[in-house]
Amino acid sequence: MKRFLIGTLLALPFYGTAQVQAVVDSSYANGHYLQRLEFFKKMPNQKNEIVFLGNSITEGGKWQELIPNKHVVNRGISGDVTYGVIARMDEVLAAKPARIFILIGINDMKRGTPEEVILNNYRKIIRMVKTQSPATKIYVESILPVNKAMLPATYAKLSNPAILEMNNQLKAICGAEKLNYVNLHEVFAGPDGELKKELSLDGLHLRSAAYILWADYLNKIQAL
């Protein structure tokens, strides 16, 4: 009996860890994701591609029109998370792009994925780029602020303090990895730290005018 109790007590910490791991939602392969990925795979690879990689915020950008005379490709998938990006990096890197702009994580945060899990997934993405396409310049873009007053209830978990903390950690990773960190808060945040109302559709997604400011900012900092 004593041996049974000791064994049970020793197992409890591991059971608790398993429970914590089990609640992390790592799903990504919904219908839209699979359709977009199939489309990407059919597109011809080009030399000196500039890749915009991310979720719906990236997908919503008309990047080829915003950045003319360059081989710009949109690799945004609405609803995507860091796990989904990891799963499709082979396709993203097939052309050995010249530059890659990464903006991902807000949907992970919406799900309540722990910060360290998201950051570790970022590290995996960075490692994959450096391994498979070492000449590619990596730009990690800050997760955009939200406007809490405009947000739908489904995004209630999001908060600007948490987003700022995540961005501080991403900036630290960029420093350690010698990568380019792009602080988009300079473009999109108002004096109160919220996403500017006039630039947003719903407190999260962007109006067309916001993408023009985004592209102008990238040109201003000579990221393009």
Image (tube, grey):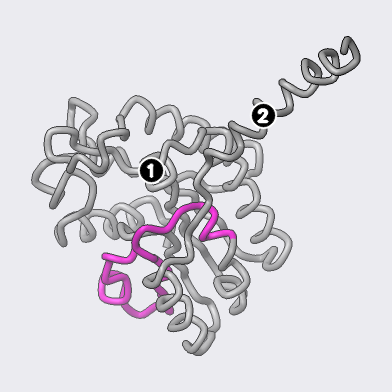
- Tell me the magenta residue range: 59-86
Distance Cα–Cα, label 1 vs label 2: 28 Å
Q: Residue 143 — which label?
A: 1
Q: Quadrant of the C terminus?
A: bottom left
Secondary structure at badge 1 equals loop
Side of 206 where 88 appears, left or right: right
Instruction: Give, as a three-letter code, the residue at label 1.
Output: Ile
Q: Give neighbour class at mark 1: few <14, some 14-19, many 20+ (Cα, 10 Å).
A: many
Instruction: Name the element at disc 2.
Output: helix
Quarter that holds the N terminus = top right
- Badge number at residue 116: none
Q: Where residue 95 appears, x then y in whole percent?
A: 59, 79
Q: Residues within 10 Å of mark 2 (few under 14, many from 20)?
A: few
Task: Tell me the residue at 57%/47% (across/down).
Answer: 122
Could you say where residue 63 lies in the image, as x and y percent from the top left?
31, 70
Amino acid type at mark 2: Thr
**Which residue is label 2 attached to?**
17
